[in-house]
Image (spheres, rainbow, N blue to C red):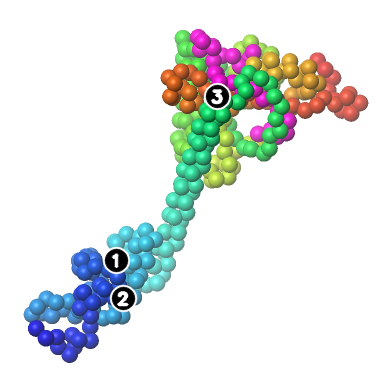
Amino acid sequence: MPRTSEQRRYLTCGQMARANSITEKTLRFYQKKGLLEPELVDEETGFRYYDILQSTTLDLITQLRTIGLSLDEIKEIEGAGDIGILRDHLLGQMAHLAEQRQALDLSERLVKDLLADCDAYYETPIYDQIIMEQRGPRYRLEFPLPPMEELARHYEHLSGSDLWEWVVRHVKQTIIERDWPLSLFHDVGYVAPRDAMDDDDLWARCAFVEVDESYGECFHAAVPFPEGLHLVMYVNHGFGDEGETLDQDRFQRMLDYAEAKNLEVVADPYCESLCRFGRLFNQTSETISAYCVPVRKKLPLEQGGHQER
C-alpha cells in the first residue's frame, strides 16, 4: 500500500533502525518497555513510523545503558521529564562505578599478591640463614590475640601448627565482622613482643595483614612496619615434625647474631608469611616465611647508647 504524504515525512521501522545502527527487534522491544513510542501508527496496517528527531531519545537510551542504568531507571528518567532526576541517577551511578573500580583495584592487588606467592615458591631464597636487609615504608592491620594459655585451654590437645591455623581463622572472621575487603585475608603474619624473646613460651602480641591505601577506609586503622635495617631469616617450614613451634629458637639465633654484630633490637620482631602454596599443592605443612628483627648499630654510651644488660 502506498504511503500517504504524512507517512512519507517519517521513517519506517527499518529505516529508523538502520539510521541508528540498531535492529528492528530492539525498536520493538523499546516500544514494549514504554521507552520509545512510534510517532505514527497506521491504524489499518499497524505499520509504525518514527520521526528522525526521536533519534535523540535513542541516543540517550544507548548512553544510559552503556553506563549501566537499567531500562526501568531509564523509563523513570524519561517519564519524569525533569533533568534533575537524570542528574540524580547519574550521580548515583558515578558512586556505584567508584565502588566497582575499588573492587576491581582490590582484585588486581590480590592477583599481584598471589603471583608474588608463586614467585616466592619458585625462587626459593636461601633458607635458615640470617641476612641483613634494608626495608622501606609499609603498613599493616593488627589483630590483637588472647593469651596463649587461654587459646590452649579453648583448643586443648592441639599442636602449635593447629593452634596457629585457628589464629588465622580468627583474623578472617574479624575482617568479615568489620566489613573490610576479604581480599585483605592473605599471608597472615604475627608480631612478637621484643621483651619476651627469651621466654620459652613465646607468643604473638598480635596477628597482622599487610595493607595499603588501595584498601580504602580500613587503611585508617593501619600502623607502619618498622623501617630501616632488619635481620631476616627465610624458612620453608613453620613448625617441627610434630607440629611444635620453632619460633623461640629462631628468634634466639637472631638475637645472638645481633649481639655478635654489635646490633640492638629497636622494635618488636615479626614473622610474615610469603607463600603457603607448598601446603596446597604438596599436601605438606610447608610454608615460606620471613622472620624479621628490626635493628640498628649500638651507640657508644657517651652518644646515648643503652647500657648492655
Determine the residue positioned at 59% across, 21% down. Answer: 235
Camera-side residue of 8 and 118: 118
Q: Mark 3 points at which residue?
A: 288
Question: In this rendering, is residue 95 above or below 144?
Answer: below
Q: Which mark is residue 55?
A: 2
Q: Give the percent coordinates (x, y) of residue 44.
A: 8, 80
Q: Is residue 140 left or right of residue 17?
A: right
Structural crowding at the residue carrying mark 1, measured as other residues with C-alpha within 10 Å and reported as few (<14), some (14–19) or many (≥20): some
Q: Magenta stretch: give its range.
A: 225-249
Q: What residue type is labelled 2?
A: Ser
Q: Is residue 78 left or right of residue 91?
A: left
Structural crowding at the residue carrying mark 2, measured as other residues with C-alpha within 10 Å and reported as few (<14), some (14–19) or many (≥20): some
Q: What residue type is labelled 3?
A: Ile
Q: Which amino acid does label 1 sit on?
A: Lys
Determine the residue positioned at 81% across, 15% down. Answer: 309
- Which tag, 2 or 1, sits closer to the chain's start? 2
Q: Label 2, label 1: how many angstroms apart (C-alpha)?
A: 16 Å
Q: Please, what secondary structure does the residue beneath circle 2 have?
A: helix
Q: Between tags 2 and 3, which lies in front? A: 3
Query: Is 48 part of what is drawn in magenta?
Result: no
Q: Mark 1 points at which residue?
A: 75
- Which tag, 3 or 1, sits closer to the chain's start? 1
Q: Determine the image quadrant of residue 65.
A: bottom left
Q: Label 2, label 3: how many angstroms apart (C-alpha)?
A: 62 Å
Camera-side residue of 193 and 49: 49
Q: Between tags 2 and 1, which lies in front? A: 2
